[in-house]
Image (cartoon, rainbow, N blue to C red):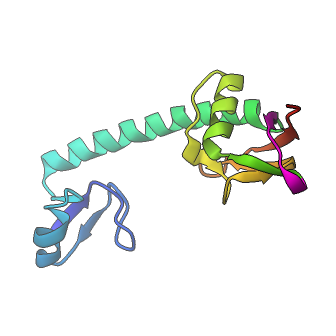
Amino acid sequence: MKVIFLQDVSDKAKAGEVKEVARGYAKNFLLPQKLATPVTPTVMKQVELRLRREREQESLDQAKFVELAGLVEGRELYFEARVGTGDRLFGSVTAADIAEELGQIVGSAIDKRKIAIDKPLREVGSHEVIVKLARGLEPRVRVVIEARNS
């Protein structure tokens, strides 16, 4: 059965590709999941138009991300926290804290899932953090945690 893929399907096809697939695979998986649709001339035109719009939107988003990366790259963020023995924090600095602070600096919201830290920062000092804005755009920021005088 010939289908056009509406979304990327890992190891099978990218969105917009036309492929011949097994009838059972199409009817039992691709079509119910709305990952693909049978090929007709009308559907081909609609999908091509939709994919063209998505590519244009992605290029606009990419331009915004490049500008945002320029604003974020090399920034230093300062946090004050209460400290216990051994320069360990009472609490931590999380990806959400970093995203909120960056958002205030650049003037637009940054998703906390874009902040690449393995675990919350719990020690005083300087930490380098990567912000994954888009594929190939990963500016680095320095997070400086200082002891709060209480």
Instruction: Tell me if I can see residue 60 in this picture.
Output: yes
Mark count: 0
- Res. 100 image quadrant: top right
Q: Does residue 29 sit above or below 97 in this rendering?
A: below
Instruction: Tell me if I can see residue 132 in this picture.
Output: no
Q: Residue at x 60, y 51 (%)?
A: 135
- Res. 142 image quadrant: top right
Find the residue positioned furthest to the top: 107
Instruction: Give the camera-side residue of 25 and 145.
Output: 145
Q: Residue 144 vs residue 26: left or right?
A: right
Q: Residue 91 vs residue 43: left or right?
A: right
Q: Residue at x 19, y 56 (%)?
A: 34
Q: Residue at x 38, y 61 (%)?
A: 14
Instruction: Give the camera-side residue of 3 and 146.
Output: 146
Q: Quadrant of the C terminus?
A: top right
Q: Residue at x 11, y 77 (%)?
A: 24
User: Looking at the picture, how far across and down is residue 106, in whole percent?
Assistant: 69, 25
- Res. 109 image quadrant: top right
User: Looking at the picture, how far across and down is residue 30, in whole percent?
Assistant: 19, 65
Query: Would you say residue 23 sits in the magenta stretch?
Result: no
User: Looking at the picture, how far across and down is residue 147, in whole percent?
Assistant: 87, 39
Q: Quadrant of the N terminus?
A: bottom left
Q: Residue 68 vs residue 23: left or right?
A: right
Q: Residue 65 vs residue 76: left or right?
A: left
Instruction: Give the camera-side residue of 35 and 129.
Output: 129
Q: Does residue 4 sit above or below 76 in this rendering?
A: below
Which segment did they paint magenta? 77-86
Instruction: Give the camera-side residue of 98 and 71.
Output: 98
